[in-house]
Amino acid sequence: MADSPALARQLEEDLWVLDTLFQGEPGVIASYLLTGPAGPALVDVGSGASLETLLAAIRASGHDPAEVKHLLITHVHLDHAGAAGGLLPHMPQATVYVHRIGAPHLIDPSKLLKSAERIYGDQMETLWGHMEPVPAERLVILDDNSEVTVGERTFSALYTPGHAVHHVAFYDQRRAAIFTGDIAGVRLEGVDYVRPPTPPPDLDLEAWTASTERLDTLRARAFYLPHFGPVYNTADHMAQLRERLYAWGDLMRAGIRAGKNDHALAADLAMASDPDIAQMVVNRTPEAITSAVRRYEVASNYLMSAQGYMRYYTKLHPEALA
Ligand SMILES: [Zn+2]
């Protein structure tokens, strides 16, 4: 029997993980749906290309998209915020929350789209669909420790740069849980492997480390990852992420010093990392391993990661390349 992939999975009484089926792949880009007396809220909304799937996922959870009141955005990358503007006509009551530095890019996405075009070329439309602007009057600007009140629940926006300079994580103190955005990395379900998503232009290992250490001090019971799903071994998870951020950094620095280009550096990352992913697939059938390697690449590809490190070392640590 061919089951279609589940669009909505209930994690707690008032919390669902929604699968946007990015590029047809299950378990790569999530959105989280919270419900309560103040109306539903979403944390991150995925690509503009999967907007209809997200609406279907909300309905599959038993809720009406038109009732959604809050869109909490961890950062304005296209796989997290791409659908925000396009959703608003379907969600006439919704307010969008985003960090101050990211806000101008939601109001006018043209600069964001132009730099994405340089990377994705004619793949833009397929991957990201249309990124519609968010009217300024529907935005609430967040700073570090801004509180977002959703009904009886209060989230603290924790400014957490390193992956993106405008990144926040949303801390739900009552639940002892953090909606981490990408600062907690990529860990797909059924695999115990944490991949650092390290795209240009904002990668900053020192800032990233400080952000993860800040989250560590909260001793969260759960991380809710956009890529993908809940993580409960939060301390081990962060330790693995930090270790790999620096291990990749050493590998990339050596490659850059040897004069390798971004494609050669990406090949180095794949050679070093794919065997580790294969080792850490829980159900180690050949199909599961192939699928895991492919889906990690869809969630955060090696070429972009290599380019992130190139920019990081060139811009922030030229002495390390001397
Ligand atoms: Zn992401």
Image (cartoon, rainbow, N blue to C red):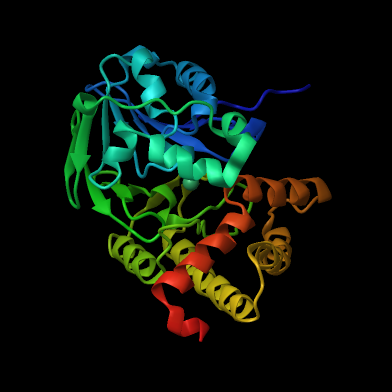
Give the camera-side residue of 85 and 190: 85
The N terminus is located in which quarter? Answer: top right
- Residue 44 seen in the current view: no
Which residue is nearer to you in this view: 279 or 185? 185
Total tally of numbered discs in the picture: 0
Q: Position of residue 28 (x, y in %)?
A: 58, 41
Furthest toward the right, the residue is 286
- Give the left or right position of residue 125, taking residue 99 as reference: right
Could you tell me residue 215's position as x and y percent? 32, 60
Percent coordinates x, y for residue 147 in the rendering? 17, 42
Q: Work out whether residue 310 can be spotted.
A: yes
Quarter of the figure with residue 131? top left
Which percent across, then down, holds residue 168?
30, 49
> What residue is shown at x 63% (from left), y 45% (from top)?
298
Q: Residue shown at 55%/61% (left/top)?
A: 307
Residue 286 higher or lower than 246, as above or below: above
- Considering every residue shown, the one lying at the far bottom of the view is 322
Q: Name the residue located 66 percent from the left edge and 72 percent from the top edge.
A: 260
Please give the name of the residue rendered at 68% of the width and 54% of the height, measured from the top-left corner. Answer: 282
